[in-house]
Each structure stands twice: as C-alpha cells, then as structure tokens.
Amino acid sequence: MIDTSRRLLSTAAAMLFVVTLTGAGGPTEAVTEPPADAPATASTDDPTEVGWRLLASLNYRTGEPSEELAALSGKLVKIPGFTVPLEDWASSATEFLLVPYVGACIHTPPPPPNQLVYIEMDEGKRAKLDGWNPVWVEGVLTIEMTESVYGYVGFTLSGQQVYPYES
C-alpha cells in the first residue's frame, strides 16, 4: 500500500513538473492572430460564431444535424473551446481536438461525438496548445461522424486561425 502511494505521488509530481515546464495555465498565445488589416466592421467573409448548443443539435446516433447546423456545413465558422492534444505533452500541433470545457478528454468516458471537434490546421500552420485557457478556432466546418483511435468525433474543422478567447 505504501509503495503504491509513493508511486502515485511520484507520478503526480512528475506530471506537475512537466505541466509547469510547458506553461499550462500561463498566458495564452496563439499560432495566428486575427489579421492586423482586418476591417473593423463585419463583412460577408467573417466567420459565423458557432456555440456548443448548436453543435449538440447533431444526433450522433443517426448522424442527422438540425437544419440550422446543416446550413453551416462547408462554411467558415469560429468555435470557442479548449484544446486537447492528440500527442502526449504536445504544446503545439497541426491536429488536435476542441472540446467545450476544460478537462474534457478522450479518456473514459469521453464527451459525446457532438461535443468533439477534430481540428486539422491548414498546411504550414501550427497551433499552440494550452488546454487550460479557452481559444477561438476559425476554419471550415464539416459535419461527419468519424471513428478514430480516440473514439467518435462528430465534426472536423480545417483550422485557419487559433487565438485567445475574448467574448
């Protein structure tokens, strides 16, 4: 019993050390910021803000989206959330998951597929990952049920920008 407790404490201390070194919980930085030359007023090319309640309208048992959600398929959107690396201890990546709340993970039990967005950044772009602070992810949304080694995911997004969340 004592050896097991020591191993658990040792493992927890090692994880805390790695998290501290990687800067989790520190200032949010992003791979890309909104363009400096972006107009102050909205244009037709601005992304549509998509909330998790709308994403949850995907019936992941049948794969059927609501009408409002279906209308966004193939469109430029921005979704707030928290990043989950698909590689252990990754601090930047070209592929990751976006989830609605901090601590959501692919461990058992994972969130339902309509609460997971698989992000693949556009070619040549990497996103700095900090799962403790929320971000906006902009890109083109695809509604598709995908099975992977990480479980089922209801959406994919070709990531164009990742930047700190501000309401």
Image: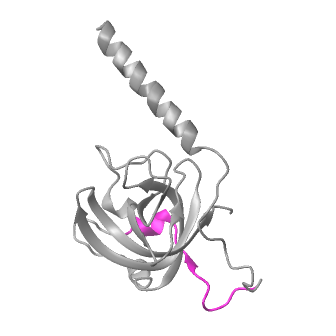
Q: Taking 160 as reference, is 149 left or right?
A: left
Find out whether residue 56 is within the magenta segment: yes
Q: Is residue 81 above or below residue 67?
A: above
Q: Taking 1 as reference, is 19 left or right?
A: right
Q: Taking 32 as reference, is 77 left or right?
A: left
Task: State how the image is colored.
Answer: one colour
Residue name at image x 65 percent, y 45 percent: 26
Displayed quadrant of residue 107: top left
Query: What segment is highlighted magenta in the picture?
Result: 41-57
Give the residue at the far top of this rendering.
Answer: 2
Displayed quadrant of residue 5: top left
In the rendering, at what x and y percent does residue 133 appear?
A: 59, 51
Find out whether residue 65 is within the magenta segment: no
Residue name at image x 30 percent, y 68 percent: 59
In the rendering, at what x and y percent does residue 33 appear?
A: 66, 71
Q: Is residue 46 above or below residue 3?
A: below
In the rendering, at what x and y percent does residue 79 appear?
A: 52, 68
Q: Main secondary structure of the magenta part?
A: loop
Counting the numbered discs, the total is 0
Q: Taking 30 as reference, is 53 left or right?
A: left
Quadrant assignment for the N terminus = top left
In the rendering, at what x and y percent does residue 80 appear?
A: 55, 63
Residue name at image x 69 percent, y 79 percent: 35
Residue 62 versus residue 108: which sits nearer the camera? Answer: 108
Quadrant assignment for the C terminus = bottom right
Give the residue at the far right of this rendering.
Answer: 40
